Image (cartoon, rainbow, N blue to C red):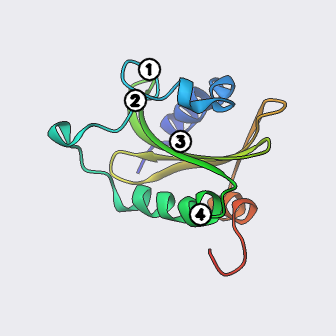
Amino acid sequence: MFSEAIHARVREFYATRIDRYSEPYRHIGMGHEFGALPQPDQYVVVPTTVLEACGFYFLNVLQRDNGSVYVFQADADGTPTFGVLATSDGSDAHLEVYGMAGDLIGAALIDRSQPALAWAEQAAVRRRAGIEGFE
């Protein structure tokens, strides 16, 4: 588990990068602040919670042809994290941030038209992305 100070620092890291969520493909990849997941020869273990989040957004966003799902790593001011970002074809986006061991650090609703980020309970974020029967 993370201390409240680490939670706050990581959330601040992601909140101050709100401008990167409007076109995430421009900010995720090698040499970028949001690093692409390593290639097989540089493999790192991805926690099951991160894989489960990917699966949830795959079914509820990507499979419905309603947006895209991105998974990345980021050093959030000294705390290594995984991020799962699901963007809609509109202005909504959903972000879940995990520690390297798979602990949920935070979940947020993003309005890319503002831009604005609001931290919320994971269940509330997923309800906004989900459709009945797929949660």
Mark in front: 4 vs 1: 4
Label 4, on which residue? 63
Label 3, on which residue? 4
Residue 65: percent from left, percent from top:
66, 57
Asked if the residues shown at circle 1 and circle 2 are in contact, with their CB atoms under 8 angstroms apart, the answer is yes
Q: Amino acid at mark 2?
A: Gly
Q: Amino acid at mark 1?
A: His
User: Gap in Å between the C-alphas at discs 4 and 3?
Assistant: 35 Å
Residue drawn at point x = 36 percent, y = 62 percent: 48
Residue drawn at point x = 52 percent, y = 33 percent: 10
Quadrant in the picture for the C terminus: bottom right
Residue 120: percent from left, percent from top:
70, 52
Dot placed on the residue nearer the N-terminal end, 4 or 1:
1
Q: Relative to the observer, which residue lies in front, 5 or 134?
A: 134
User: Gap in Å between the C-alphas at discs 4 and 2?
Assistant: 24 Å
Callout count: 4
Dot placed on the residue nearer the N-terminal end, 2 or 3:
3
Q: Residues within 10 Å of mark 2 (few under 14, many from 20)?
A: some
Label 2, on which residue? 35
Dot placed on the residue nearer the N-terminal end, 4 or 3:
3
Numbered badge on residue 32: 1
User: Gap in Å between the C-alphas at discs 3 and 1?
Assistant: 27 Å
Q: Amino acid at mark 3?
A: Glu
- The answer to whether residue 62 is left or right of residue 99 is right
Residue 8: percent from left, percent from top:
58, 35
